[in-house]
Amino acid sequence: MDSLLDYSTALSNETDQEALLALQNLITSPNNFLANNWTKTTSFCSWFGVTCSLKRPRVVALALPNLQLQGTISPSLANLSFLREPNLKNNLFHGGIPYGLGHLPRLRVIDIQNNQLKGNIPTSVFQHRRVQKISLAFNEFSGEMWKGPRISGNLPNKFGNMSQLAFLSLIDNQLTGSIPAALFNISSLVGMSVSLNSLSGPLLLDEGNIVSNLEVLSMSYNQISGHIPSNICQLTQLKILSISFNNVIGDIPRNIGCLSKLEEFYIGHNPIKGTIPASLGNTSTLRNLYCALNYLEGPIPPELAKLSNLCYFNISSLKYIGFNLNNLSGRIPTTTGFHLPNLISLVLGGNQLEGEIPLFITNASNLKILDLAGNFLTGTIPTNLGNLHELQRLLLHSNQLTNEPTEHELRLFNSLVDCRMLRYLQVGSNPLNGVLPNSIGNVSSTIEILYIGDTHLNGLIPQGHIAEAVCHLSNLVKLDMDRNEPQE
């Protein structure tokens, strides 16, 4: 009996060794390091990238990422019956996925992203009940099941059978069809990224109660249509919702603030209309808010002033706010007490906003991009913008902004001397009505574009004054002073 067991163990060991050698025979590695390392003179458990079980000499993991490996993936990989984690990402593999890979009983992770793989995706990959992570992103799959130059065809409805699936990444392929509603009822699923495909149809969640722990839902750059589901509040754990660059219509749900853990919200470049829901102000965790090129209208809700983490808009944790190229009207909220220490980008250009530039903006000490261009803003440009030492882009052109009425010189430039990282300075197409100060020559040498055309510059510009100033702007690519008529 013992001899029979020993024979079985030896046969299993030989199967794993032969499977690995078959894989290696189809691979070319830099300096042939893999062929030199994977030899029969040493135990395969000691080979580079191979991990064996602690209990028996059977391969449980194969980690060969980022090695510039070329060749095809041998079907013998499916003979590694104890294999749990094949990791071949970021290489140059071509050919297809071995059909038997999805039948490995102990499979937990499939990571072959960023290769040049083609052919069929085995249906078994999407039906394995124990798989926890699937990453097939950045490949060129095609074949009978998936028709098209890359992964194409419909997403299989049997995804719903994957009771342990936690991460699904199919980014940058040619998947078509709709997203199965059953995916949103896999309680183990935490992240789903299907951006950069050709998915269509509406985004539908299962009717009734949804048991979802989904934290990341990324579907940008597809052809998703329909409305944002009214029952999206059932995705209670959602932190990132990205549906930009689709065909989503209708309004943003009024109760969108129910997503109390939301940190990043991207809905730009969709024909979404209506107003900005005030309930967004309840999302205290929100950092990035991108709603550019929609059909949003109406005022910016003052409730957004409560968002302390916002990086790209008006919320204190917020870092990024993008509502450019909409039809927003009214004034930028001027609620006192705004504290925006984390705000990096405030982009509200191309709307119908009016009123003055709120002074609280000058307290956003980390602000790098301020774009208020193409609105109906009036009043004077704050003269303490120099407080924004991190500022790289200042776009205030095409408004109705003026200079201080009691000032002859354009004091704005005196303040901007302190913005030493400034690259784009565009204040043209405003009736500033003033004289360029000598400090124009002291603005940051990092400036690449300076637009002060059509600003009603007056007074005599001393000969050589501008030329001397420009000499200090060593990175200047474009200087626009057109449509000014200096007067005496």
Image (cartoon, rainbow, N blue to C red):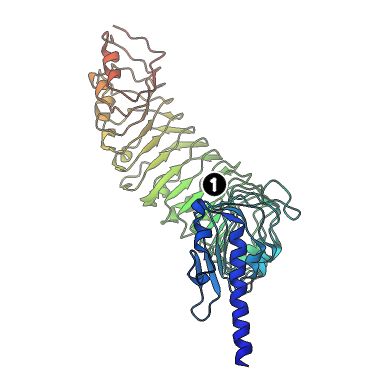
Asked if residue 373 can be seen in this view, the reply is yes
Image check: 49 left or right of 210?
left
Image check: 172 left or right of 369?
right
Q: Is residue 139 above or below residue 8?
A: above
Residue 395: x %, y % from top left: 40, 30
What residue occupies the far front of the structure in this picture?
41
Residue 406: x %, y % from top left: 25, 21
Residue behind mark 1: 267
Q: Nearer the viewer, residue 113 or 61?
A: 61
In the rendered view of the protein, which quadrant contains the N terminus? bottom right
Residue 121: x %, y % from top left: 68, 58
Q: Nearer the viewer, residue 276 or 221?
A: 221
Q: Quadrant of residue 413?
A: top left
Q: Quadrant of residue 263?
A: bottom left
Q: Is residue 161 above or below residue 487?
A: below
What residue occupies the far right of the structure in this picture?
144
The amino acid sitting under disc 1 is Ile
Residue 130: x %, y % from top left: 60, 72
SS class, disc 1: loop
Image check: 336 left or right of 5?
left
Asked if residue 107 can be seen in this view, the reply is no
Query: Which residue is rendered at x = 56% and y = 70% of the image?
Result: 84
